[in-house]
Image: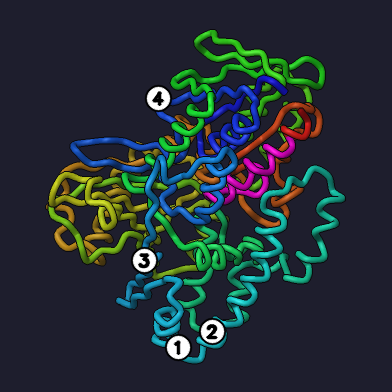
Amino acid sequence: MKQAAVIGAGFGGLALAIRLQSAGVDTTILEARDKPGGRAYFWEKDGFTFDAGPTVITAPEALAELWQISGHDIAEDVKLVPVSPFYRLDWPDGTRFDYSNDDAQLRAEIARLDPEDVDGYRRFLAYSEAVYREGYVKLGHVAFLDFASMVKAAPALAQHQAWRSVYSMVSRFVKNEKLRQALSFHTLLVGGDPMKTSAIYALIHKLERDGGVWFAMGGTNRLVAAMVTHFERLGGTLRLGDPVAAIDTLGDRVTGVRTQSGFELKVDALASNADVVHSYRHLLKESRSARRTASRLERKRFSPSLFVVHFGVEGACPEVPHHSILFGPRYKGLLADIYDHGVLSEDFSLYLHHPTATDPSMAPPDHATFYALAPVPHLGKFPADWSEIGPMLEERILAEVEKRMVPKLRERIVTRFHYAPPDFTHDLNAHLGSAFSLEPILTQSAWFRVHNRDDQIGNLYFVGAGTHPGAGIPGVVGSAKATAALMLDGA
């Protein structure tokens, strides 16, 4: 393989392109937007820097490896710093729980909720370690191209009761409802309902505990910029602001790619980091097998969307940690409304991101940068007019943050804007405005997810949230490792 193209400069596309370029493959990334990053886009407004997300960086060793394979050091291009506590969890009754990997502190936090659950947490941790070994270390960077590979993995999945949900497995070990929420909410960060997502995803707890939670100084956008710098240092080419119009095929092979500007590139292999439905339905519309795949994909379950309010405020907020989870009055019921019923509830749970807690340079002096994120139903379940709903929901979210975390917030706001489900569709071609692609339930995981290499078109590959192993930075970087191995082996 001499020439490869990657569609999309998200984390997955960048990680894959770095691996290919490091192996000597002439690689071009084609990105539709004016900046790289995909879902990790950013805006600069009124002196504030706003990351679109993702903002929780875990498994830093997987990122560092992208530099190490060519004899470089990630520290050349970006500074990653640890965040502690990982999250402050906050409930409407005033209960707060600082979640970290400091054993003594964590046991004390658990004991405050229920002393009897300290031993239950120890047993949950042992379970999390076991599924981490099976689900992440052994399977997280390996492609599932045939059902035989799934059968081979089945005994380990069965041993760890992968058919159970994360929440039900957590509930086997601890009794306190708040602690059950504290140990199961992580699946929401990759688009999964804790009540349905496979218990294998309990591995996230071990992943965070071992590797920590990190932040890129300057914002997630600086990590993206570092990946671009490294890719271009290796000789790779990034084309921005030029959406792909079509992937050209001849029989069962990709031959090239064309963009809206008229640019054409002949390739030996192509990988898409674009939305999987968009890739099959629109970019490969001339391929009969791709149209059939698109029809099958459209019948699957997709993760929810997000409503995100970005705001900059006067005055520093030293009392607010970097990451907070503001639970609502309901947990199971709210999740059912979002994932099953397609209802925009009166109540909500929020993830509050406060990057200036770690890096004050992301706001003007004596100011603070925030975003508040609420999971909401995707457009297939809730096809509402967000131009009407958005401003009302924005106001309700800001009122809740003011009540629980930032006094006099609304009178201190200098600048604000929101990002709603239609923006995911418009900016990212996300099917139904989903923020995380396919929902990570067991029957849409591993071999049941979009394959890292297409079954019919032999030199067409996929990377990112829609393929194995799934969403989140460790997931999409893992998908890049699996896909790169296939592409280089096929070369």
Measure how far apart labels 4 and 2 are at the Cα level.
Answer: 49 Å
Placement of 339 over or under 39, stated as above or below: below
What residue is pinned by disc 3?
Answer: 84
User: In the image, residue 440 lies at what x, y percent?
Assistant: 63, 53
Tell whether 236 sits left or right of 225.
right
Few, some or many residues within 10 Å of mark 2 (<14, 14–19, 20+)? some
Q: Earlier in the sequence, mark 1 or mark 3?
A: 3
Q: Earlier in the sequence, mark 4 or mark 3?
A: 4
Measure how far apart labels 4 and 1 are at the Cα level.
Answer: 50 Å
Regarding mark 1 in the picture, which secondary structure is present there? loop
Image point (69%, 68%), residue name:
164
Q: Earlier in the sequence, mark 2 or mark 3?
A: 3
For the question of whether residue 227 can be seen, the reply is yes
Question: Which sits in the foreground, 386 or 120?
Answer: 120
Residue furthest bottom as drawn: 116
Measure how far apart labels 2 and 3 are at the Cα level.
Answer: 26 Å
What residue is pinned by disc 1?
Answer: 114
Q: Are marks 4 and 2 in contact (CB under 8 Å)?
A: no
Q: Nearer the viewer, mark 1 or mark 3?
A: 3
Which residues fall within the magenta stretch? 467-486
Q: Are marks 1 and 2 in contact (CB under 8 Å)?
A: yes
User: In the image, residue 352 lies at what x, y percent?
Assistant: 34, 57
Measure how far apart labels 1 and 2 are at the Cα level.
Answer: 8 Å
Q: Are marks 1 and 3 in contact (CB under 8 Å)?
A: no
| Residue 472 is one of the magenta-drawn residues | yes
Q: Amino acid at mark 2?
A: Lys
